[in-house]
């Protein structure tokens, strides 16, 4: 993609959610990372088998959450496929809401006595990329006349909302 050649906020992060030793410290409905969508284009998440906690909001706006299970490989000669791909806010912008940004969270799992590790690759386009619907016969024109913003302006708005 041409829009990935300049300054971006693409980042690779190594995440650790420490174990919770005291069972009184956490309940099964406690949250390690609250409900959110990812700010960028897409997110690629690598996780290990047996490390539960990632949950997907089934209907995007209610409180119906489903665990994202580890999907092992069908080929016994290979390791499991610990890969999850989330569409971010920018895919939702560019497709005029045809592809929705994935709302998710990280909950405290039953196996809270283990650390949870993941590697997350957040893909963002070039900062000055315009966030408007792609010109395509498959994507309807934006009827809301949303103000045009850049990828960087969107990132700043989301960070401001997050850290108020």
Image (cartoon, rainbow, N blue to C red):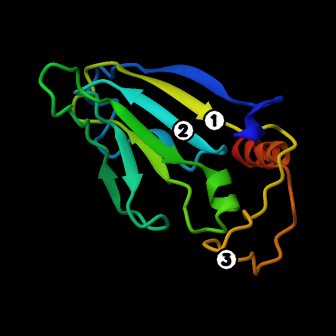
Q: Residue at x 74, y 49 (%)?
A: 161
Which quadrant holds residue 137?
A: bottom right
Distance from disc 2 to disc 1, alpha carbons, whole Å, reads 6 Å
Q: Residue 61: image x %, image y %?
A: 49, 67
Q: Which residue is mark 1?
A: 123
**Mark 3 packing: few (<14 Cα in 10 Å), some, or many (20+)?**
some
Q: Which residue is mark 2?
A: 43
**Mark 2 packing: few (<14 Cα in 10 Å), some, or many (20+)?**
many
Quadrant location, the N terminus: top right
Q: Residue at x 45, y 45 (%)?
A: 105
Q: Residue 64: image x %, image y %?
A: 35, 63
User: Circles 3 and 2: CB distance less than 8 Å?
Assistant: no
User: Is residue 21 placed above or below 67 in the rendered structure?
Assistant: above
Q: Residue 42: image x %, image y %?
A: 57, 43
**152 sits to left or right of 16:** right
User: Is residue 33 placed above or below 90 in the rendered structure?
Assistant: above
């Amino acid at each position: 993609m041409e829009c990935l050649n300049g300054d971006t906020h693409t980042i690779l992060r190594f995440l650790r959610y420490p174990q919770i030793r005291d069972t009184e410290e956490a309940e099964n409905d406690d949250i390690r990372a609250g409900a959110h969508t990812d700010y960028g284009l897409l997110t690629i998440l690598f996780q290990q088998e047996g490390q539960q906690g990632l949950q997907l909001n089934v209907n995007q706006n209610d409180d119906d959450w489903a665990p994202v299970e580890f999907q092992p490989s069908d080929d016994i000669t290979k390791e499991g496929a610990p890969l999850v791909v989330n569409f971010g806010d920018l895919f939702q912008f560019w497709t005029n809401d045809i592809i929705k940004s994935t709302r998710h969270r990280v909950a405290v799992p039953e196996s809270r006595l283990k650390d949870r590790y993941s590697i997350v690759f957040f893909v963002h386009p070039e900062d000055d990329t315009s966030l408007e619907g792609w010109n395509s016969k498959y994507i309807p024109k934006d009827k809301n006349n949303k103000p045009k913003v850049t990828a960087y302006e969107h990132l700043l708005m989301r960070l401001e909302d997050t850290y108020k």
